[in-house]
Image (cartoon, helix red, strand yellow):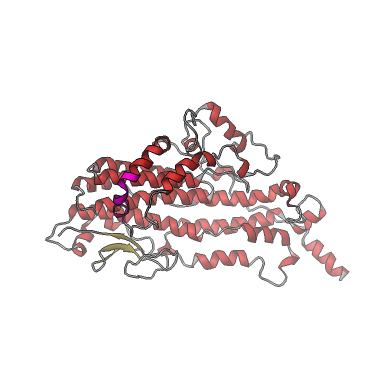
Amino acid sequence: MILFGVGVVIYNSFDESLNPKSYTYADLKPATFDPANGYYLLWGLGEPEGVDVQSEEYTKSFRKIFDPGIRDKKAPVYDPLSNPLSKKKQFEIYSKAIRSLKFPQNDSCAEDWITTLNPQSEKLSEVQQTCALLLKRYRALIDSPRVEDFSYPSADVPIPHLLGLLHSAKLYTAISTAKAVKGQWQEAVADFLAQVDFAKRLVSTSRPQINNLIAKAVMNYSLSGLVNIMNHPGCPPSVYTQVIEGMPPLKYEEYGNRNSIIFEYLTGSGILDELPRYAADGEKKMLPFTKPGFLGRLFLQKNTTKNYFYDYFSHCLAYDSQEPSLWKTDPRIELEWLVMSKTSSFFWRLKNPVGKVIYSIYAPSCYVSIFKAYRLRCRYEMTRLLAELKREYSPSMTVSDLLPKLKTYRWHDPFSGKPYKWNPGKNVLYSIGIDGVDNGGIENTTTYKTDIMVPVVIKK
């Protein structure tokens, strides 16, 4: 037994070298702390009248928390609930007003914004007045040339009031939809396209995974709104051209997760460097053997654990940056195996046990984020395809005959590697989804067993 113990100590005495390909802070998209960065507007959506959220006075407090050049890494673990920057209570008056409206319940195009909002036109006007300052700030955010997420990779990094962003985007989408129905078609489409462009900028610079997901949801609102108004019987043909010209091919960085995946690696890796700080803040019982010293070095090998994280997140990035139709394996299975393999063998506790536990707890599932990235791309491309289809359609032809002649039709479905499909019985354009199974354009709220569809209303 003594020899066995000595063997375990020797076995754990050697840490690995850090993988030379490991990501560093320099691999993140750079973000400026200049007050002109629209990310300050995102933080300040709920600020009261008279507060200039892009003033030097307002923005300087953010640098103390986020700027790696002056951030105090030895400060106590940050408590987001005590953050004076969040202003969640100040946003409540807006939130209550917006929640009094009924919106479509999911982010697909199945539920019509126009049908849902038409009976609420008076209420919508009241809410618009109540939220006038919020809408002014949100419009300034949308119009910001730069929206650069400057979140610092740390387990306790604060995030802006993202529910407030979603509420603002929903209300903005509802107002833009109402404009179209009232005959302001071109102005409404311009509003939608501005929100799409803003979401592209935020997706590409988002660091925490949740920020990226919320940015995608904002773009989905606009795409659903555009589909709804283009299918409206009163929509003028000029709108179709406006949509086509305003929606060029989507770049990977505008729908993918690269920046967020690298950020998650840096956060997981950073946890290992900050463990003594967490232990000092009352986490000692939950994270044993994390302080510097013999036991810490014996049961937690930092470089070895960081290499676990790099292996996991580099696999996530490989899947995220390659179209699903080209995948050789199922990321759900491989990513889960990468985590489980560290703690599934009988003898896993003999080598780096604390590091393995931390890795298995922290490594987040990237599968849903990858699916939502490609779903967003599909929705975007099919929205543009709808515009081109409606512009070129005439009763003398069928949709099936027309589709191959359209430029956007050559933008293939990333899930199949083939053109998007058309179901004449259901009148929907659709992608077969991540499971690769053609369900005829039936879209569910699940991730795996669902197609992704856009309805098509053709005047014959």
Left or right of residue 265: residue 331: left
In this rendered view, identify the residue nearer to me: 72 or 301: 72
Q: Is residue 73 above or below residue 21?
A: above
Q: Which residues are magenta?
A: 112-123
Residue 118 magenta-drawn?
Answer: yes
Would you say residue 225 sits in the magenta stretch? no
- Viewer-nearest residue: 126 or 18: 126
In this view, which residue lies farthest toward the left? 396
Image coordinates of residue 209 in percent, x first then y, are 52, 51
Image coordinates for residue 416, horizontal then vertical, percent? 36, 65
- Position of residue 341 in the picture relative to residue 406 (left or right): right
- The quarter of the picture where residue 68 lies is top right
Quadrant containing the N terminus is bottom right
Q: Can see residue 21?
A: no
Image-quadrant location for residue 338: bottom right
Above or below, 60 relative to 259: above
Please provide percent x and percent y for residue 75. 70, 39
> Between 193 and 177, which is closer to the camera in this rendering?
177
Answer yes or no: is residue 239 visible.
yes
Rendered-image quadrant of the C terminus: bottom left
The percent position of residue 135, horizontal first and vertical second, equals 40, 38
For residue 364, what is the image quadrant? bottom right
Left or right: residue 327 versus residue 57 is: left
| Image point (34%, 44%), residue name | 124
Q: Residue at x 70, y 58 (%)?
A: 355
**Total marks placed:** 0
Dominant secondary-structure state across the stretch colored magenta: helix
Given the current orientation, which residue lies at the most extreme right position? 2
